[in-house]
């Protein structure tokens, strides 16, 4: 919870703690950045208007540090402020004054969204690695075909045979073939 208003910050943080949430508080954006460095929260509640760095600037900095879902909590509901806030992918924008019960649905949605985004990033990393591995394997097959006049299936069989013999993945052998220009795999054929 980041808010320069002590009463609001303590009331919301206290209410969340009573409901079983772990919380940490900061009275300004710089203190919040320090806390995030020490303790990676699952969700952030950020006031828009604070002295020094605004909540919108804090949101931009938090996004640079990684995907941390957050919502804005503000006493301002003007269209310009809301538009500026929405440009930073907030889960919600709630207008003060409000009670803890009004915040819980946004927190829960934010936590689900965060988990979904993390799962998507993990899948993306796996797919990117698979594409990279496939590219390396296909390039190595092409090198073997070119250098030794082989058919595609023959070249792949050589890679697969080497991988089995060395108890390694086909891609690891393919990367090695690419590094030596296709001659290494044929030497042990």
Image (spheres, rainbow, N blue to C red):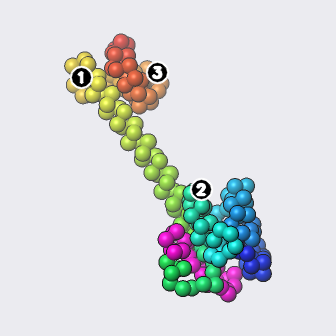
Disc with the residue nearer the chain's start (1 vs 3): 1
State how many labels appear.
3
Near mark 3 (Cα within 10 A), the count class, few <14, some 14-19 or many ≥20, is few
- In-front residue for pair 83/128: 83
Which label number is shown at residue 75? none
- Frontmost of labels 1 and 3 is 1
CA gap between label 1 and label 3 equals 24 Å
Which residue shows up at 53% across the image and 66% down it?
Answer: 113
> Closer to us: mark 2 or mark 1?
2
Whether residue 104 is visible to the viewer of this picture, yes or no, is: no
| Cα–Cα span, label 2 and label 1 | 46 Å
* Residue 97 x %, y %: 67, 87
Relative horizontal placement of residue 90, taking residue 17 as reference (left or right):
left
Identify the residue at horizontal 74%, vertical 79% (top origin): 5
Quadrant (top left/top right/bottom left/bottom right) for the C terminus: top left
Q: Which secondary structure lies at badge 3?
A: helix
Does the magenta segment cover residue 48?
A: no
**Where does the image place residue 30, in percent across and percent down from the top left?**
70, 63
Which residue does the numbered mark 1 point to in the structure image?
Answer: 146
Work out which quarter of the rendered image holds the N terminus and state it: bottom right
Residue 179's image quarter?
A: top left
Residue in front for this viewpoint, 8 or 182: 8
**CB contact under 8 Å: marks 2 and 3:** no
What is the magenta range?
Answer: 84-108
Mark on residue 65?
Answer: 2
Residue under the point 51% across and 81% down: 80
Q: Which residue is mark 3?
A: 166
Mark 2 residue crowding within 10 angstroms, few (<14) / some (14–19) / many (20+): few
Q: Nearer the viewer, mark 2 or mark 3?
A: 2
Residue lying furthest top in this view?
187
Give how far across and how far down residue 168 sits, in percent.
47, 27
**Cα–Cα span, label 2 and label 3:** 41 Å
């Amino acid at each position: 919870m980041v808010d320069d208003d002590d009463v609001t910050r303590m009331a919301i943080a206290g209410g969340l703690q009573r409901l079983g949430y772990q919380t940490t508080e900061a009275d300004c954006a710089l203190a919040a950045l320090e806390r995030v460095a020490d303790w990676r929260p699952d969700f952030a509640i950020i006031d828009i208007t604070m002295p020094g760095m605004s909540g919108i600037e804090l949101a931009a900095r938090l996004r640079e540090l990684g995907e941390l879902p957050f919502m804005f909590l503000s006493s301002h509901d003007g269209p310009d402020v809301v538009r500026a806030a929405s440009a930073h992918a907030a889960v919600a924008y709630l207008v003060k004054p409000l009670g803890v019960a009004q915040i819980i649905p946004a927190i829960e949605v934010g936590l689900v969204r965060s988990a979904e985004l993390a799962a998507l990033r993990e899948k993306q990393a796996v797919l990117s690695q698979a594409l990279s591995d496939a590219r390396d394997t296909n390039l190595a097959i092409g090198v073997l075909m070119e250098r030794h006049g082989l058919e595609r299936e023959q070249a792949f069989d050589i890679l697969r045979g080497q991988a089995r013999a060395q108890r390694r993945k086909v891609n690891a052998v393919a990367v090695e073939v690419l590094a030596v220009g296709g001659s290494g795999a044929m030497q042990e054929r």
